[in-house]
Image: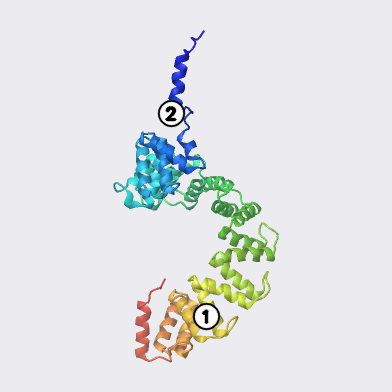
Amino acid sequence: MPLPVPMHWLLVGLCLLATPGGLLAQDAETVYNRSDAASAFKELKPRAEAGDASAQYHLGLLYEFGQHVAKNPSEAARWYRLAGKQGQARALYHLGMLLEANPRLAAAPGEGTDALKRAAEMGEMPAQYAYAELLASGKAPGGAAQAEHWWRKAAEQGDFKAQYRLGMLFHLGRGVPANAPEAAKWLALAAEAGFAPAQFQYAVILEQGLGVHPNPQEAARWLQKAAGQGDADAQFNLAVKYDKGQGVHKDPAQAALWMERAAAQGDVQAQMALSQWYEQGQGVAKDMTQAVRWLTEAAQKGDARAQWLLGRRYAAGLGVKQNQVEASKWMTRAADRGDAKAQNDLGVRCFEGQGVKKNPAAGYAWLLLAAAQGDAEARANLAYAETLVSPRQKAQAEKAAKAWKVKR
């Protein structure tokens, strides 16, 4: 029969848990989570100063995010350090992230990375993911193999971003051997967790049958989920599926709806496709103004083919007021980026002085560049242009073409 616990021993135990006011002390996390940050600060600070690691960590949060007190990253780092020295993993994680964002606060080079590594080694899931990101980007020594190790640690704890990263690592085979079944496994987990980029990539895997049986219908289902969350890649690919009737019933209106959503997010492929659809009246009412609008959006983002096509629209006055100077401007941008069609057209315009100053040597150089890329029209034009330039102009053109480099 166990001995009864003496009453005075029980009272001593209760006294150890009591605050000076006679109430049971709450743990630092409960105090921090109060809606009243002022009272939380008042209670946490003396605890932190007395050496309570959890209080030090939560006081650091108050300083980092400006709760009741003014934001003070330096003071936050001080309290995180103190808590970290006592093995507080979350404090080390926050210290690492804070120092990576504000390197000047580091007490020594690499302090942020070291803090993240220590927290990762202690099993702190967000730190494992963050440390893997540093390894993968080359900001911490170790490379892809070490990144894979820490992404896996976080993924096994349920971190969906780590699951996605791990899946993509095996899908692309960057720094580790490609492994389609392993990629599919981790991407499926991240997709199930609702992470839109993973849902899109898992749809691609299902469509192509990489590590899984091909399933166009299931691929379309995951595209729908990702597209519904605003993933532009998924929206574009879902639009293509509705346009072609792949895995879904062919539906031009749905195709146009999703293509417009992707285009509105700045997806250049979608902007180009939508421009073409408006020009042809495919799934939408034919509208040359809208066609030029989306073509302009893509051209302004630096797409060379869009720039060339926009130049042609200005040259012909299709959907815009005819403007040969504007036409040559866009064709020059496309030609500078290496588009052979634009180089050919610009070459001809230089010979004719259309929208640009007449310059046979420059025209011949552009035709040389386009022909070198295999453009048949440029080759034909080059043969005729040879009869229009002097030996001196031809030599200048050849020199210019040889020295030409793509502009970005």
Rendered image quadrant of residue 200: bottom right
Residue 70 x %, y %: 41, 50
At mark 2, the secondary structure is loop
Position of 61 relative to 300 (above/below): above
Q: Residue furthest left?
A: 108
> Where does the C terminus fall, quadrant-wise?
bottom left
* Residue placed most toward the observer, 173 or 383: 173
Q: Nearer the viewer, residue 240 or 64?
A: 64
Q: Is residue 131 above or below residue 13?
A: below
The amino acid sitting under disc 1 is Gly
Badge 2 is on which residue?
20
Q: Is residue 192 visible?
A: yes
Q: CA distance from mark 2 to mark 1?
A: 80 Å
Q: Give the label, 2 or 1, closer to the camera.
A: 2
Sequence-wise, the earlier of marks 2 and 1 is 2
Q: Residue at x 44, y 16 (%)?
A: 9
82 on left or right of 234 = left
